[in-house]
Image (cartoon, rainbow, N blue to C red):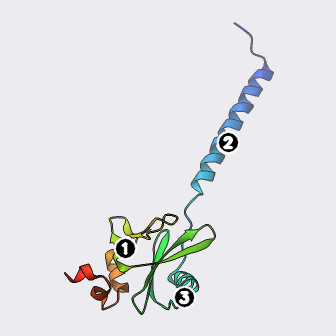
Amino acid sequence: MTDVTDREIWIAVGAAVVAVLLTVGVVLALRGRRKPRIASPEEAAEAAERALSGFDTQGAVVGTPGAIDRQRAGRVAVMTRDGARIAVREVPWGALRSTAEGILIDTGERKLGAVLVAGVDALDVRRLAPADLKRLVPHLGR
């Protein structure tokens, strides 16, 4: 057996402390990485009106991490955070689908893809829908 010196013990203890601190740091860094969200319906409305020509918001719902806006003429916009900015796309009403997690919107774009607005349900979307929704989405009138 080899004799372990006091110096070697302190080196081992120091290495263990550094390893624990490093692990705690990585866990805290990963835990803090939450998807940024749109703060309010007002922020969503402002983003939609800025991004889409002639869009005058009549109602908005905000979920995690996105939002849905409706305009008087029946236009609907979906948005999600893209870093510091908000990505906004106009989509047809038929692109909105209700799921157990929230509303799933197929943007039809490869870059943005499908957007899940969690925490928003079909009732929230129904409140946004215009009275003549059957005219805008033909398959609903069947």
The image shows residue 38, relative to residue 126, as above or below, that is above
- Given the image, on which type of amino acid does mark 3 rest? Ser
Q: Are marks 3 and 1 in contact (CB under 8 Å)?
A: no
Q: Is residue 58 left or right of residue 9?
A: left
The image shows residue 38 at horizontal and vertical percentages of: 54, 74
Q: Residue furthest top?
A: 1
In the rendering, which numbered label is found on residue 74?
Answer: none
Q: How far separated are the C-alphas under marks 2 and 3?
A: 50 Å
In the rendering, which numbered label is found on residue 53?
Answer: 3
In the rendering, which numbered label is found on residue 95?
Answer: 1
Front-most of 62 and 107?
107
Residue at (47% x, 65% y) in the render? 113
The image shows residue 33, relative to residue 6, as above or below, that is below
Say few, some or many: other residues with alpha carbon within 10 Å of mark 1 (under 14 / 14 to 19 / 20 or more): some
Location of the C terminus by quadrant is: bottom left
Q: Nearer the viewer, mark 2 or mark 3?
A: 3
Residue for badge 2: 22
- Given the image, on which type of amino acid does mark 1 rest? Ala
Secondary structure of the residue carrying tag 2 is helix
Secondary structure of the residue carrying tag 1 is helix
Q: How many marks?
A: 3
